[in-house]
Image (cartoon, rainbow, N blue to C red):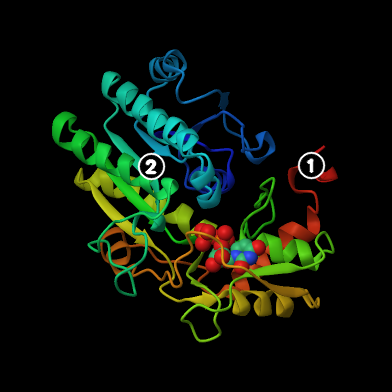
Amino acid sequence: MTILVTGGAGYIGSHTVLYLKEQGEDVIVLDNLQKGHKKAVLGVPLYEGDLRDEKLLDNIFSKHTIDAVIHFAANSLVGESVEKPLEYYDNNVLGSYQLVKSMVKNNVKKIVFSSTAATYGEPTSIPIQESDPTLPTNPYGETKLAIEKMLRWSNDAYGLKSVCLRYFNAAGADPQGRIGEDHTPESHLIPIVLQAALGQREHVSIFGDDYQTEDGSCIRDYIHVLDLAQAHYLALKKLEETNESGVYNLGNEKGFSVKEVIETCRTVTQKEIKAVIGPRRAGDPAVLIASSEKAKNELGWNPQYPDLETIVTHAWNWHVNHPSGYQSKQYN
Ligand code: UDP
């Protein structure tokens, strides 16, 4: 199979590219490198450009025989999306619209889409099932849900088959340490705690300890980035075999509080890591835990690294060896 991966220089995208290569697939990456890293794209062609560039997309589709697209390219920060909703509609919705339009025009009929648990908003029950209500509480979730709906209608109208994967909290890094997580500025919990362990931050702020949870801090379901990569591959296989569209949650079905994550990081790193209670972050639901039964049953998904300590260990290996991320000397 020849697969076009949009956003393949980003965190989840680059790990998926590596995984696909290891399964023997041909991969082409399209990334505008706004957030992605050239150095994260290992051994596959990289088109540097934007999804909203119609000519570039048509050029890629006519130059290569693409069997399927995996679509990661997007802005993905909840807080930022509340401050800059139009940027999210522009990049996420317009970018995806352009991609789908070019796919239809060039007769490419399979897409795996990077969606999110943020499509659910405040959950009505835990664990969250795919059939639960989708009422996003921020523009990030709204744009992802709008794209899911565009794909659903495009299925009916154009026969474009899609699998939408709703990730919970992606974490960890390549177990072999070749690539990892590098955002500037960093906003995700585990890399922030590990930066504190490295002495790059004075402390970690716990965003609220007055939630209705056992220790008062928010609970999330952390899933290894390579297990996400595996799910994308399985989703493509399913599209090939059954030609049926679908929506799947991807999480470990187990919740950890912010305080528990920090404690796990202390255990793994053997560092003290100072934590300070801060105010709540706007738009944070108290508890998000997936039911992933559907992905396990229908895709045959079988997470390899479900244990939080393993996830943090892989992330820590990357951070210790690349304290400046892709700016570290190993990449120069
Ligand atoms: N969080 C925190 N301090 C930080 C960053 C995150 O307490 O410096 C909390 C955040 O409120 C959420 C959890 O950690 O409950 C995971 O946040 P992250 O940004 O990693 O992922 P999200 O859940 O937003 O996708």
Asked whether 298 or 149 is in front, the reply is: 149
Q: Quadrant of residue 133?
A: bottom left
- Asked if 96 appears above or below 82 in the picture, the reply is above
Residue 113 in percent (x, y) is at 37, 43
The kind of residue tagged 2 is Thr
Q: Amino acid at mark 1?
A: Gln
* Image spot of residue 42 (x, y percent): 63, 38
Which secondary structure, mark 1? helix
Q: Is residue 17 left or right of residue 235?
A: right
Residue 143: which disc? 2
Question: Which residue corresponds to mark 1?
Answer: 327
Would residue 263 be found to the left or right of residue 235 on screen? right
Location of residue 279 with respect to 247 vertically, above or below: below
| Residue located 45% across and 61% down the image | 168
How far apart are the alpha carbons under marks 1 and 2? 31 Å
Closer to the chain start, of discs 1 and 2, is 2
Where is ligand 1, by quadrant? bottom right
Label 1 near ligand 1 (CB < 8 Å): no
Residue at x-position 42% and y-position 35%: 89
Residue ID at (39%, 55%): 137
Q: Can residue 4 be seen in this snapshot?
A: yes
